Amino acid sequence: MSEGSGDVPIIETRDITRYFSVGHGSAGRGRTVLKAVDGVSLAIRRGETLALVGETGSGKTTFGRLLLGLYKPTGGDALYRGSSMLAARGETAQAVRRQIQGVFQDPYSSLNPTMTVGQSLAEVLKVHKIAGRRDRSQAVAELLTTVGLSPAQAARRPQAFSGGERQRIGIARALAARPEVVIADEPLSALDVSIQAQVLNLLIALQERRGLTYLFVTHDLDVARHISQRTAVMYLGRVVEYAPTGDLFAEPLHPYTQALIAAAPRLSTKRKAVKPALGGDIPNAIERPPGCHFHPRCPLAMPVCAEREPELLPVGDGRSVACHLHDPGVMAAA
Ligand code: SF4
């Protein structure tokens, strides 16, 4: 997957955290802190798609926003091509930011309804100094063609487009900056099932043509399996499993991943609302259970699970899992 860049991942996070202060506790109890992302270390290789999956509230969207610079980390670091993005300043910081663009669930929110689509795209080209004034119309026409729209549609405003077309415009907007990395955050969730496959195939084709790297944030395991080479599973702010996608779906190791996969609809069937075969709901991220945060819902929980938090440990074949069942040290003492 790497291309002339050795083994340096294009994106890497090291123990990155993002906490939110969500008010104050009762008198004397201080601030209430939501640990949305809590010590995540992940690497994304150039040209690959890493899927980030988990239920609502797992922290996957916050993680994507950290990489986009929409949130500042509370701790840890994020690296682009081996250099800290947080330490970058001035033009270097701007250049790095241009290389990482987002495609979101609701493309409408990032499009100015008072501007034509052509004006919105030209604005991005101008901000990033991609094309001079005279070349912008041509560049806009090429962007629209690239995402399967017609150059004539540049004169229309976002509200004149269908949901699928708007998402194509959202993708064109991201591509206008000529990024290397795209953070796609649930880009299919708001679309009709019949349109989802078209947008997914467009994203795959663009990746092949442009050598893009994707972080694909999704709650939909079928989509993750279809698009990614590797998958990370998040639960309450932590990565609990990380593996080549084929291996993860063939033999999930973490009990949470096993339950998610057991609950996922088959690729060949029509999608239904996912109802995880898990005991109870995802706990409140503000008051995470002690020890393994998954233990109240885990069918395989042992006494140690309520006391000690498992570490994300390598288990061979490029896989890592955070579960005491896969920690020889803990199992030997049990
Ligand atoms: Fe279940 Fe214990 Fe593993 Fe957590 S550490 S997933 S509670 S077996």
Image: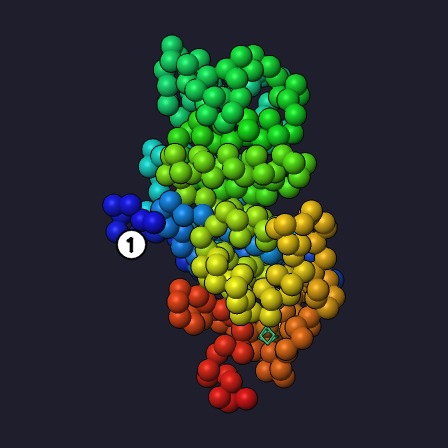
Q: Position of residue 178 (x, y in %)?
A: 39, 30
Q: Position of residue 99 (x, y in %)?
A: 39, 37
Q: Residue at x 51, y 25 (%)?
A: 148
Residue 163 seen in the figure? yes
Q: Amino acid at mark 1?
A: Asp
Which image quadrant for residue 35? bottom right
Q: Is mark 1 within 8 Å of ligand 1?
A: no
Q: Secondary structure at mark 1?
A: loop
Q: Nearer the viewer, residue 330 or 154?
A: 154
Q: Nearer the viewer, residue 220 or 136?
A: 220
In the rendered image, the vertical position of residue 316 relative to residue 261, given as above or below: below
Q: Nearer the viewer, residue 132 or 38?
A: 132
Q: Residue at x 27, y 47 (%)?
A: 5
Q: Position of residue 97 (x, y in %)?
A: 41, 37
State the residue position of label 1: 7
Residue 25 seen in the figure? no
Which image quadrant for residue 26? bottom right
Q: Residue at x 50, y 77 (%)?
A: 326
Quadrant in which ligand 1 is drawn: bottom right
